[in-house]
Every structure is written in C-alpha cells, then in structure tokens.
Image (spheres, grey):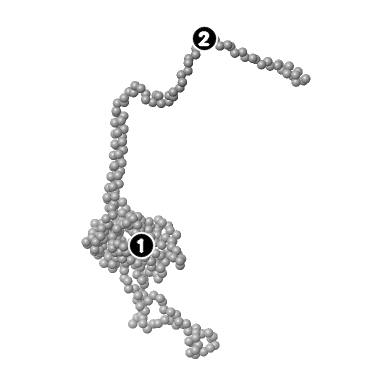
Amino acid sequence: MSAFKRKRGGQRPADKKAKKAKFVANADDAPNEAVEENRNEVTIPPPVSKGKWTNKERVLIFSSRGINFRTRHLMKDLKTMMPHSKEDTKMDRKDKLFVVNEVCEIKNCNKCLFFEAKKNGKKLTYFNVTSTVHTLAELKMTGNCLKGSRPLLSFDPKFDKEPHYALLKELFIQTFSTPRYHPKSQPFVDHVFTFSIADNRIWFRNYQIIEEDASIVEIGPRFVLNLIKIFQGSFGGPTLYENPDFQSPNMHRRQIRLAAAAKVREKQMVKEMHKLKKAEVKEDLVKDVTADVFLTPAEEKPVHIQTEAPEPKVVKKKQKAFKRQRMQMARR
C-alpha cells in the first residue's frame, strides 16, 4: 500500500491535526517532565485554506480566425486576469455558432467568451460588441497587482434598475469572479473590476488597491461594451431583449458614406450656380449709382477774373562779408 497522498484541492485526513513542536529550555533538565513539556510546547495552527474548492466555474476564451493584434492582446490580458479561464485554438469562420457549445463541453467549461472577427476590426462576442479597446501593453499604467489574485467586482447602481442590466450583472459576476480556493488563484484581494454604465454602454476598468484607505490606481485593460441582443439559450434561442439604441457597423458606415455623398452634391450645386451666374448677360449701367456718394454740398463763390498783372516781388539779398573781412572783424 502506498502512503496517503493528498490531492490538490482536497481535504486533509481527519486523523491529522495541527502540528506541535517541542522546545527544551536547558539541555541539562530532564525532558520527560510533564510540566516542562506543557510549558515549552508550541502549537502551529493549520493553514487557513482547507482546500474546499466548490465553485467549479471555468471560462473558455477563444476567437475565430481573422482577428487583429488588438483583439489577440485583449484575450491575453483577460486570460492573465482570470486564473479560472481556459484557451483553445481558433475556430473556422465557416463553422456555425452552436459549435462553440460542443467546444465548451469538450473543455469542461460552463462559460465562454468568444470573439468573432467582423469588418473594420469589430469584435463580436456572444452577448456584446467591443467597440473601444485599450490593452495593458498599450496603456502602460503605473498600477500593478498580484497575478492570480481574486478581484472585487464593483457595479454601477443602474444595474439594479433595469431587468436586462440585472441579467448582465449576474452574468458578469459568474464570468469575471475568481472562484474561492481555486488552485491557480492566490488568497489575496488587491484589485477591483468596475462596470459602469454611460451613454448606453458598459465601461470596464481595472484598478489596483494600493493603500488600506481604499486609494486606487488604474492598471488596465479598458474596453467598452455595447449590448446587441440577449438570447434565451447559449449562442441561440428566442430573443429576450434587443437594444433599440444599437446601430450596426454596416448602418454606421452607410451613414458616413451618405454624409460624404451629400457634401459632394452640395459642392457640385454651388459650382453649377456659379457657372450660371457667370453666363448671365450683364446690364450696361448708363449712370453710376455710387458716383454721388462722396459729394458734399458747398456754397458757390463768385468767380474773380484778374485783368492786371501782379506786382513783382522784391527779394532782398543778404550781403555776406568776404573771408578777409570776417577775419579782420574777428581780430578786432
């Protein structure tokens, strides 16, 4: 018979209790005395975690082929933050979405984050579309946390007011919360996942708890989720909720093209009107309307005609002494 081997995550045998260590104060004293044994005996408490891993939540994170580098880095960051996650190879675009259920069953996962590549880099998951993504390597935040530690989940008060937001809140709790006593998790809580609602979208942020007074600093990644539909089943079934404010990327691109075409048509109309104005025959104006704008009325003076020639002006020349005379005057 082999020795008892404790499984990872299992309970310890019932016959083993807390370890005890004995210390002898002096080597000359007899260690068999009961009083000395009780006095010098130190009890080492058992570990806090008893290995009761009951929540077997596992999240499968993978994507379809054709994703860009930003989506790949976001998936890597999510796998780093979620120790209870698993990964799989990329799924072919030709496969239907119900194939994801079979992949989850093979991987023994009951939750899934599937990223489907769309046009212009849009990432479509099974319940939302990721419109804005900033990864850890891109942000370069100053915060840091222990890898595998369990996060706190913080939700906006609006999640409790609407039924579809309440359903998403429960879905986020089951997906992003690390199960207690998970083998790959650490027994520490040093970061917070926040889910806030603004502009009919869900904003995700990750913060580190740096002090005991709950001061926080952002770590990353950050992304924005836009709800499209909520189905009754996994990757299919009747539609329970449809977002009336959601605008598909194709419709958004169509509106951009229509706006650009409207600007081009407006410029063409302005050019045609300019050509028509140039082609019009200009009327010859006999009298200038603006000719009398600066004329001011003044009194008419009588006209005086001079019949006699004016007297010549006499210019007196100033007599200037010669140089010799000036020198003589200076000697005197």
Q: Where is residue 203 in the image (x, y as percent from the top left)?
A: 35, 58
Q: In this view, does 10 lie above or below 118?
A: below
Residue found at the far top of this picture? 308
Rate crowding at label 1 as few (under 14), some (14 to 19) or many (20 or more) other CA atoms within 10 Å: some
Seen at 38% across and 68% down, the residue is 150
What residue is shown with label 2?
A: 307
Mark 1 to mark 2: distance in Å?
107 Å
Quick one: SS at disc 2?
A: loop
> Is the N terminus in the top left, top right, bottom left or bottom right quadrant?
bottom left
Q: In this view, does 251 lie above or below 222?
A: above
Mark 1 vs mark 2, foreground winner is 2
What residue is shown with label 1?
A: 156
Q: Are marks 1 and 2 in contact (CB under 8 Å)?
A: no
Q: Position of residue 80 (x, y in %)?
A: 37, 63
Q: Position of residue 281 (x, y in %)?
A: 29, 26
Q: Earlier in the sequence, mark 1 or mark 2?
A: 1
Asked where in the image residue 181 lies, by quadrant, the reply is bottom left
